[in-house]
Each structure stands twice: as structure tokens, then as C-alpha cells.
């Protein structure tokens, strides 16, 4: 078993997958000035299969633009697109679209389960501290997250939890061929998982670990899904708990050995989930929802796309996303200005913005506002504009 785990964590396995898909490192034109980061260096000292433990007071890995040669552009664009399905650009479009155009009930459940799974995955990275694949031999295509640790793959966790939570939640709610839904869930999660190998950001073991952890979490949380559906009818003090608990979890996030975007991404995820939860409570408490709370009758016909319906959906999405992005920009600028003034730093100072007492509050306030706006104010704007 130990030998199998070491082979699944081998960087050469990732490199061979990249080569088979037509991705090769460009010939070196000179000495590389950016050496391996601390996680990579620690792994190199221990061997490719050994996790890095006990790293303290080390510099962050320095991102660099790695030159590469693409010999198969079909796989290149397929996996780069698939990788984007596990990033913020997908979350801030797909999840609101689901809420505004398909089913708020499904959207709320999906977001809360997704937040729980992603928080556990993000924290696990900074507790386990397993390195990403070594480069060379692996070609790394994403430099933003190069400073993060690898195990588990939160892309794999996000894709698995989104696809299979939707499948399970819609099985008895809408009429559609279950086999077709299962195939789509498997295809979606598989493409995202393979993209993590193609982009060189995870080992096979990282990806399998993310899938296995998500499967366990889905099984453990499934009995509580009906409770999630009733959160909007909780007590008047519920919004306070929904905001304070996630904020404390973000503020007391495991202290990293060096700066990486993991804490900031975790804060974004938890804050968005808190905002959606609070927004749903506001809708129910002040009776702002368009219809009665709760799910519609089970086994309803699945929403069928039509030209008029598609145009309406795209219009609602365009109106909603414009308001959401405007709120995000405004709240982010205001909260950052207030915090930087309080701590007497310049908002343009990148290092100052990474400080715990600045980064966590401004991101949390920003994305709580985004979540509330998406669930409360955007539907109100839709009704005001006559967009059913």
C-alpha cells in the first residue's frame, strides 16, 4: 500500500500524463532564476513521494512564467477551460445563475454543502503540507496558486460536491433520466480532475484524495440536508451566528509558514456562504420571497430551455451579475479604505493588504455583501423590472 501511495504521488506520473496530452517543457535557454519553493525543496530533499512536515520560517515559493510547448491544442483548451470550472469565475456565474433562473432551493443547499466541503479541504492543505508536483519534470501552468500546498485537490472536491449534490438533490425533484444526470456529473468532475494533472498543479494522489474526502463528507452530511432547507426559518439571532462563526473560522485559520492565497480563498468561500444564508433568512423573515418558502412538489418537469426562456434567463443573469459586481467593487473599496486608514497603511501596499487583520475582514465583508445582494436585492430588482 505504501508503495502504491508513493507511486500515485510521483511527479513523473503527472509529467507523463502531460506529455501524452501534448504538453512539453520548452528547451532551457539559460539558468532558471526562480528555484523550487520551500514545499518543493523539502520534497526534493526527502524524495518525490514524501510529504513535507514541520516547515517554519521559510520564504514563499516565487511564481515564474514557465515556457512550454503545446503540440495538441484540443487538450490544451479543453483542460484550461475545465480548470476554470473550479475557480471563482465559475462560482460567481454558475451559482447565481442557478439561484435566479433555475431553483433557489437547490442553489441554497448546493452553496452550503459546497462551503462546508471546501473549508475542510482548504484547511487540510495547510495542516498536511504536502507539496505540489515538482517542476521539472512537471510543467506548471498556473502561477497564482503555486505557493499553496497540494493535498487534497480542492478543484476535485469542488467539482465532485457540485455535480453530485445537484444530482442527489434533483433526483426526486425533477423528472429526467437519472443515468443521463449521472453521466453528466461524472463527466464534469472527471474533466476538472484531469485538468489538475494537465496544468501540473496536483499529483494523482491529491486528486484521488479530494474525491475520496468529498465522497465521505457527502455521506456524512446527507442526513442534515433537510435541516439546511429550513435555515431560512431559523430564529431572529440566526444571522448573527451565520456571520460570526464563519468569520472566526477564517480569522483563526491555521497559520501558514509563508503567504499563500489559501486563507484569502477560504475567507471568500465562507463569506459568500454566510451571505447567501443571511440573504435567505432576510427573504423569509421579511417575506420578500416571490413565492412560499420550501421546495415545489417533487418530480416536477425539469426546466426545458426555449428561445424566449433562454433570452429571459440571460437578461436576468446580466442584470443580476452587473449589480453583484458593482456591489463587490464598491464594498471592497470602502472596506479596504476603512481598514487601511485604521491601521495606517496605504491601500495600494500589497504586503499590507495581506496582513491577517486587513485581509480577512475586508474579504469577509465584501463577499457577505455579495451573497446578500445575490439572494435578496437581485430578485427584488428582477421583480421591479418585471423579470419573472
Image: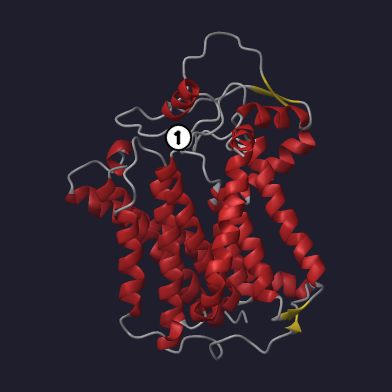
Q: Residue at x 67, y 42 (%)?
A: 195
Q: Residue at x 50, y 68 (%)?
A: 112
Q: Is residue 306 positioned above or below 290 on the image? A: above
| In this rendering, position of residue 79 left or right of residue 223 | right
Q: Nearer the viewer, residue 234 or 179?
A: 179
| In this rendering, position of residue 387 left or right of residue 350 | right
Q: Nearer the viewer, residue 206 or 238?
A: 206
Q: Secondary structure at mark 1?
A: loop
Q: Residue at x 40, y 34 (%)?
A: 53
Q: Position of residue 160 (x, y in %)?
A: 63, 57
Count of labels in the image: 1
Whether residue 86 is visible here, answered yes or no, is no
Q: Quadrant of residue 258?
A: top left
Q: Residue at x 62, y 26 (%)?
A: 138
Q: Position of residue 18 (x, y in %)?
A: 71, 30
Q: Nearer the viewer, residue 234 or 322?
A: 234
Q: Quadrant of residue 248?
A: bottom left
| In this rendering, position of residue 84 left or right of residue 125 | right
Quarter of the image containing the C terminus? bottom right
Q: Position of residue 123 (x, y in %)?
A: 42, 50
Give the colouring mode of the picture.
secondary structure
Q: Position of residue 164 (x, y in %)?
A: 66, 64
Q: Quadrant of residue 6?
A: top right
| Residue at the top extreme, as displayed | 30
| Residue at the front extreme, as displayed | 1
| In this rendering, position of residue 309 left or right of residue 386 | right
Quarter of the image containing the N terminus? top right
Q: Which residue is mark 1?
A: 147
Whether residue 193 is visible here, answered yes or no, is yes
Amino acid at each position: 500500500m505504501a508503495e502504491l501511495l508513493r507511486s500515485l504521488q510521483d511527479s513523473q506520473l503527472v509529467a507523463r500524463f502531460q506529455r501524452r496530452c501534448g504538453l512539453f517543457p520548452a528547451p532551457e535557454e539559460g539558468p532558471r532564476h526562480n528555484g523550487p519553493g520551500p514545499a518543493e525543496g523539502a520534497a526534493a530533499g526527502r524524495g518525490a513521494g514524501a510529504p513535507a512536515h514541520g516547515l517554519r520560517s521559510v520564504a514563499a515559493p516565487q511564481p515564474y512564467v514557465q515556457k512550454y510547448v503545446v503540440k495538441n491544442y484540443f487538450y490544451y483548451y479543453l483542460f484550461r477551460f475545465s480548470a476554470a470550472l473550479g475557480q471563482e469565475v465559475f462560482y460567481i456565474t454558475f451559482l447565481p445563475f442557478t439561484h435566479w433562473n433555475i431553483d433557489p432551493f437547490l442553489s441554497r443547499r448546493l452553496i452550503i454543502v459546497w462551503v462546508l466541503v471546501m473549508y475542510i479541504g482548504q484547511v487540510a492543505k495547510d495542516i498536511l503540507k504536502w507539496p505540489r508536483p515538482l517542476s521539472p519534470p512537471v510543467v506548471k501552468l498556473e502561477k497564482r496558486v503555486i505557493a499553496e500546498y497540494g493535498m487534497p485537490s480542492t478543484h476535485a472536491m469542488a467539482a465532485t460536491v457540485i455535480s453530485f449534490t445537484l444530482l442527489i438533490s434533483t433526483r426526486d425533484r425533477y423528472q429526467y433520466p437519472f443515468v443521463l444526470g449521472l453521466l453528466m456529473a461524472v463527466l464534469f468532475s472527471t474533466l476538472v480532475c484531469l485538468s489538475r494533472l494537465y496544468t501540473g498543479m496536483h499529483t494523482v494522489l491529491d486528486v484521488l484524495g479530494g474525491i475520496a474526502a468529498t465522497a465521505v463528507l457527502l455521506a456524512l452530511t446527507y442526513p442534515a440536508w433537510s435541516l439546511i432547507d429550513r435555515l431560512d426559518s431559523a430564529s431572529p439571532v440566526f444571522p448573527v451566528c451565520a456571520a460570526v462563526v464563519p468569520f472566526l473560522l477564517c480569522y483563526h485559520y491555521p497559520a501558514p509558514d509563508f503567504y499563500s492565497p489559501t486563507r484569502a480563498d477560504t475567507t471568500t468561500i465562507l463569506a459568500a456562504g454566510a451571505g447567501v444564508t443571511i440573504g435567505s433568512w432576510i427573504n423569509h423573515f421579511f417575506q420578500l420571497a416571490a413565492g412560499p418558502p420550501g421546495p415545489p412538489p417533487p418530480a416536477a418537469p425539469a426546466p426545458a430551455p426555449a428561445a424566449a426562456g433562454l433570452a429571459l434567463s440571460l437578461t436576468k443573469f446580466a442584470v443580476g451579475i452587473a449589480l453583484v459586481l458593482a456591489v463587490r467593487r464598491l464594498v471592497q473599496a470602502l472596506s479596504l479604505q476603512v481598514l487601511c486608514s485604521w491601521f495606517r497603511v496605504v491601500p495600494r501596499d500589497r504586503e499590507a493588504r495581506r496582513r491577517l487583520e486587513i485581509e480577512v475582514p475586508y474579504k469577509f465583508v465584501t463577499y457577505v455583501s455579495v451573497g446578500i445582494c445575490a439572494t435578496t436585492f437581485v430578485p427584488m430588482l428582477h421583480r421591479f423590472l418585471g423579470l419573472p
